[in-house]
Amino acid sequence: MGLVYLDENDPIFPDSCNALNDPDGLLAFGGNLSPKTLLNAYKKGIFPWYQAGDPIMWWSPSTRCILRLDKFHVSKSLGKLIRKNNHTITVNKAFKEVLNSCSAPRDKQAGGTWITSQMHEAYYELHKLGYAHSLEVWSNSLLVGGLYGLAVNGIFSGESMFSKIPNASKLALYVLCRQLRLASFALIDCQIQTNHLLRLGAEVISRDAFLDILGSREELCLKWKAPLEIIL
């Protein structure tokens, strides 16, 4: 079928099986980042990923990195941080600040990340609608780590995380797994495989297997009713 152009006013996503093999998973370009379009994409296992100045690109890779909520690996260093219990964990208290920290240049990274100004605006709109959430890790009044993502139909799509001190983002992810289990969520969609995620307990499954999981939960319409503050 080849790469599909999406109309800006009425984007209709093709079936994920039509995604390209090279680059793996590229399905379409164009469209828009309205809440309706983004929610429709995530429910189909499709996500946007592109650089500033490029058209919006939509992806559904042949393999998917996921984290089952009971498989998160707690390292020795993270275990010590949890036992110290000297950080405060909040939810949705500083969504914009988390977004800004996630999009800041990382070590050895010359420019910003893929989180463009368009993406900032789009995910903040989803946050106001109750779909996009952030977890914050605080040391006293200083934001030292966190993550954000999108909760749709019992699946949490993790978008990005950051740390300003060792293990802060891991602590946020550990707490997220625990809270999502309590809310009857299935898993965290990590999207793209990295060695870091695999060390944390993530695994790689086929696109078809991931879409089967999505399909089995499409009638649940679960939103995450997140607590404001979490006790470790």
Image (cartoon, rainbow, N blue to C red):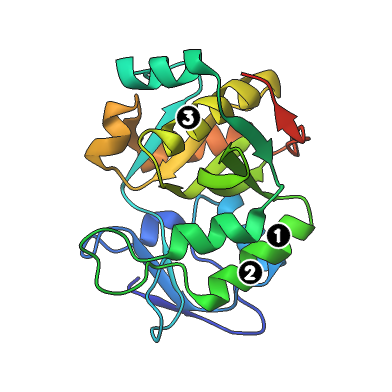
Q: Is any part of residue 47 visible from this angle?
A: no
Res. 64 image quadrant: top left
Q: Is residue 6 above or below residue 171?
A: below
Q: In this view, does 44 lie above or below 104?
A: above
Please tell me the numbered disc located at residue 171.
3
Residue 173 lies, in percent from the top left, at 49, 32
Mark 2 Cα-neighbour bin, 10 Å: few <14, some 14–19, many ≥20: some
- Disc 2 designates what residue? 122
Residue appearing at x 37%, y 76% in the figure: 51
**Left or right: residue 36 compared with residue 173:** right
Q: Quadrant of the C terminus?
A: top right
Left or right of residue 34: residue 27: left
* Residue 126 visible (yes or no): yes
What residue type is disc 1 on? Leu
Find out whether the residues at labels 2 and 1 contact each other: C-beta distance under 8 Å.
Answer: yes
Q: Do the residues labelled 3 and 2 touch (CB within 8 Å)?
A: no
Q: Name the residue under label 1.
A: 126
Percent position of residue 129, x then y? 79, 57
What is the CA distance from the residue labelled 3 to the residue labelled 1? Answer: 24 Å
* x then y, percent, for residue 199: 27, 28
- Disc 3 marks a residue whose amino acid type is Leu
Local crowd size for mark 1, using a 10 Å CA cut-off: few (<14), some (14–19), many (≥20) = many
